Image (cartoon, helix red, strand yellow):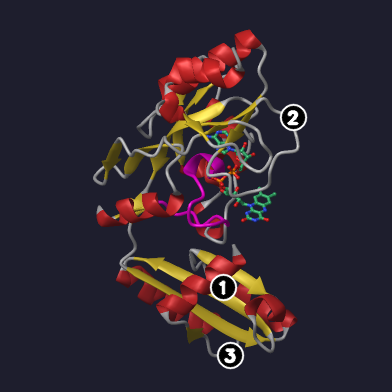
Amino acid sequence: MTILEKVTALLGEGAVLEAGTDRVPRVAPGSPDAIALLLGTAHQEGWRVRIEGAGTWLQSDAPADLALTTRRLDRIPAIEPSDLTATAEAGIGLDQLRQQLADRGAWLAIDPPGLAGRTLGSVVSTATAGPLRHGFGPIKDHLLGVTFVTGDGRMVQSGGRVMKNVAGYDLTRLQAGGFGAFGVIVLVHLRLRTLPRADVTYVLEGAREDLTQVGEDIAAAGLTPAALELVSPALARRERWVLAVRLAGSPALVAADEAGLGAASGGGRFAPLRAEEAHAFWMRLA
Ligand SMILES: Cc1cc2nc3c(=O)[nH]c(=O)nc-3n(C[C@H](O)[C@H](O)[C@H](O)COP(=O)(O)OP(=O)(O)OC[C@H]3O[C@@H](n4cnc5c(N)ncnc54)[C@H](O)[C@@H]3O)c2cc1C
C-alpha cells in the first residue's frame, strides 16, 4: 500500500488533495482528531510530515513524504463578545475571522503581513506581528491558550478559554513563533478587544531627525497610539520621511489623543488619512 492509499483508508478520499508543484502529496484532515490520527500513524510508519496553513508563504526545503494542511480546520467554535474571548480553528483565514469578530463587535488587535487567506495557525506559529504590536503587544499577548497535536499524535491543550489559568509550564507562549516545532496547532483561544468605534491615522512629513523627536515627544506625553511608525520616503511613497500615528479606541479616548498629538507635533501639522488610504498604508508597512 502506498502512503496515499493508507491515508485515504485512514481519513477518507476527501482528505487527500492534489499534490502541489513540489509533488509532495497534500493531506487536509477535517478535524483536530483526524490530525491526531494522521500524525500518530505517520509516527508509527516513519513518514516525514510538513505542516502547512494556506501554503501562501515560502515552501519548506525540508524533505517530506506528505504535506499536512490545516485549511479544512476553518470553524470558529466560540465568540464571546461579553468576555472578549474567542476560540477558532487554526486553518481559518485571518481576514475571515476578523470579519466574523467585527460582526459581533469584537477585535483581534493584530495586523500581520501576508495575503488575505493566511491562516490563524500560521500567524501564531510564525509570530508575525504588524504595526499594531506597538499598542497591543506581540502575538503571544493575544493568546489565552492553544491546542496542538504532537508529532506522535497526542493532543495537548495548553492554557484555556479564560483569562485566569492554572499555573504550570507556559506551552502557549512556546507555540508563538515555534514554527510548528512543538506540533501542529489545531485550536487557538484568543484574547479580544472591543471593536474600536474610532480609528484614525495621522501622518506628518518632515526630516527624519525632526520626526524622531516628535515620536519621542508623543511617548513622553503619555499618548497611547495603537501604532506609531517612522517610515522612509520610499516605503511611504512620499517626498520626505513620514511619522504615522494610528489612534484607535473610544471616540473620547481618540479625541483626547488627537489633542495631545497637536501639542507634540513640534509646530508641524498632522494630516488625517482617509480610511481606505490608511488601510493600504498599514498593510504596506506590515
Ligand atoms: C521571516 C518571515 C518572512 C516572511 N516573508 C513573507 C513573504 O515574503 N511574503 C509573504 O506573503 N509573507 C511572508 N511572511 C508572512 C507569511 O505570509 C505569514 O507567515 C502568513 O501567515 C502565512 O500564511 P499561510 O497560512 O499561507 O502559512 P504557510 O505558508 O502555509 O505556513 C507558514 C509557516 O507556518 C507554519 N504553520 C502553518 N500553520 C501551522 C499550524 N497550524 N501549526 C504549526 N505551524 C503552522 C508552517 O509550517 C510554515 O512554517 C513572512 C513571515 C516571516 C516570519
Q: Tell whether circle 2 marks a residue whose Cβ is less than 8 angstroms from ligand 1.
A: no
**At label 3, which amino acid type do we have?**
Gly
Any mark on residue 116, and which?
Answer: none
The kind of secondary structure element at disc 3 is loop
Residue, far top: 44
The segment highlighted magenta reads 108-123
Q: Nearer the viewer, mark 2 or mark 1?
A: 2
Q: Compared with residue 48, is residue 274 higher up or lower down, i.e. above or below?
A: below
Q: Which residue is mark 1?
A: 218
118 falls in the magenta region:
yes
Residue 7: in magenta span: no
Q: Identify the amino acid type marked 2.
A: Pro
Q: Estimate the x, y position of residue 106 in percent, counting from the top left.
A: 31, 53
Q: Identify residue for label 3.
A: 268
First of labels 3, 2 by sequence position: 2
Q: What secondary structure characterizes most of the magenta part?
A: loop
Residue at the spot of label 2: 63
Q: CA distance from mark 3 to mark 2?
A: 55 Å
